[in-house]
Image: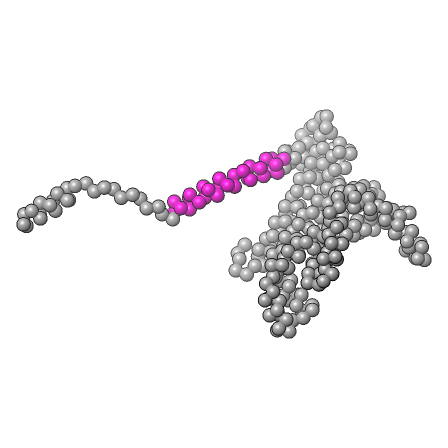
């Protein structure tokens, strides 16, 4: 018996063992997931490269030339040197900054207040509809309406004269900075509806129990708004403010249709300066330089804003 057992053990040791199938490890799982993620993202990344990055690189290259549309001569950074020493560019940059501040203070703040005030009242739907309708209008239609109101013999001046306030009459669109301020007001009339819609969406995500608990703790009115509602709306506020910053930096249609950047170039924004230099003066290299600067400003402002928002989140690292 012992001899047989010993022979079987020896045969078992001599028989080659079948190799075991490798067990997938966490590294292979991560690699497979990365491949799938890359496959899904590849079309979007390709579109971004084709429609955004490549045109920007072409524009940046063209900004290095003195180009009038017929002949082009390489001048290096001369267009940028001329740009930053041009007083018109400084005024254009100042106007763009005014638009950023104006669209943050007015449409965003008004949209937030109107959303909170009309969210849970019976007549709220009517008020919201009146605010949202202008947002459905095109920029050209809005500009035409405000031109009718603000021109020298327009509805605003005629109304002031009719009620005995003729001394308040102004040439609203013919003097800077008055024309820039009234154009910001016109944009506020149209853009507040977008902020209102987004903040209403944010209000619907606030749990009713949170508001009720705050009221039971004695929070009412302004205290409830500032300490409960505003913090709960922070994710939507990030979106609304970010969109407002980017849109204000690219402001073009309202300025062009109401004042064409006048008087002279006094109310031009960066986008309007780029258009005038490129398509009116046929300075394609110079206009490309303005375009590059505008793109850099938009990207930098968006990055700094989003970076600041991420830094403010507890537990997040930048």
Would residue 181 be counted in the magenta stretch? no
Residue 209 to residue 85: above or below: below
Which residue is outermost to the front? 122
Would residue 52 be counted in the magenta stretch? yes
Query: Is residue 32 visible to us here?
Result: yes
Task: Tell me the magenta residue range.
Answer: 27-55
Q: How is the image coloured?
A: one colour
Please report the residue visible at 66 percent of the width from the left and 42 percent of the height from the top.
295
Q: Nearer the viewer, residue 12 or 61?
A: 12
Residue 44 to residue 180: above or below: above
Classified by dominant secondary structure, the portion drawn in magenta counts as helix
Task: Give the quadrant of residue 15.
Answer: top left
Task: Give the quadrant of residue 285.
Answer: top right
Please report the residue visible at 42 percent of the width from the left and 46 percent of the height from the top.
30
How far across and how far down the image is residue 34, in percent? Answer: 45, 44
- Please state, as top left, top right, bottom left or bottom right, where the C terminus lies in the image: bottom right
Please report the residue visible at 72 percent of the width from the left and 33 percent of the height from the top.
284
């Amino acid at each position: 018996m012992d001899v047989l057992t010993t022979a079987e053990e020896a045969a078992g040791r001599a028989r080659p063992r079948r190799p075991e199938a490798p067990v997938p490890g966490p590294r292979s799982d991560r690699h497979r997931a990365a491949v799938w993620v890359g496959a899904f993202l590849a079309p979007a990344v390709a579109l971004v490269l084709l429609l955004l990055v490549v045109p920007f690189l072409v524009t940046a290259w063209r900004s290095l030339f003195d180009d009038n549309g017929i002949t082009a001569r390489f001048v290096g950074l001369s267009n940028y040197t001329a740009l930053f020493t041009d007083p018109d560019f400084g005024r254009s940059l100042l106007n763009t900054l005014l638009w950023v501040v104006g669209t943050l203070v007015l449409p965003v703040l008004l949209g937030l207040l109107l959303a909170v005030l009309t969210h849970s009242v019976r007549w709220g739907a009517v008020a919201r509809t009146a605010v949202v309708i202008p947002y459905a209008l095109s920029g050209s239609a809005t500009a035409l309406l405000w031109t009718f109101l603000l021109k020298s013999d327009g509805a605003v001046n005629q109304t002031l004269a009719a009620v005995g306030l003729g001394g308040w009459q102004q040439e609203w669109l013919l003097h800077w900075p008055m024309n820039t301020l009234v154009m910001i007001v016109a944009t506020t009339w149209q853009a507040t509806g977008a902020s209102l819609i987004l903040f209403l969406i944010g209000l619907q995500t606030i749990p009713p129990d949170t508001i009720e608990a705050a009221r039971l703790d004695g929070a009412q009115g302004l205290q409830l708004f500032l300490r409960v509602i505003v913090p709960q709306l922070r994710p939507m506020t990030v979106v609304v403010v970010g969109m407002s910053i980017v849109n204000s930096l690219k402001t073009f249609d309202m300025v062009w249709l109401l004042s064409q950047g006048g008087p002279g170039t006094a109310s031009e924004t960066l986008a309007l300066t780029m258009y005038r230099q490129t398509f009116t003066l046929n300075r394609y290299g110079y206009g490309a330089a303005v375009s590059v600067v505008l793109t850099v400003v938009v990207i930098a402002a968006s990055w700094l804003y989003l970076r600041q928002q991420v830094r403010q989140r507890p537990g997040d690292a930048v």
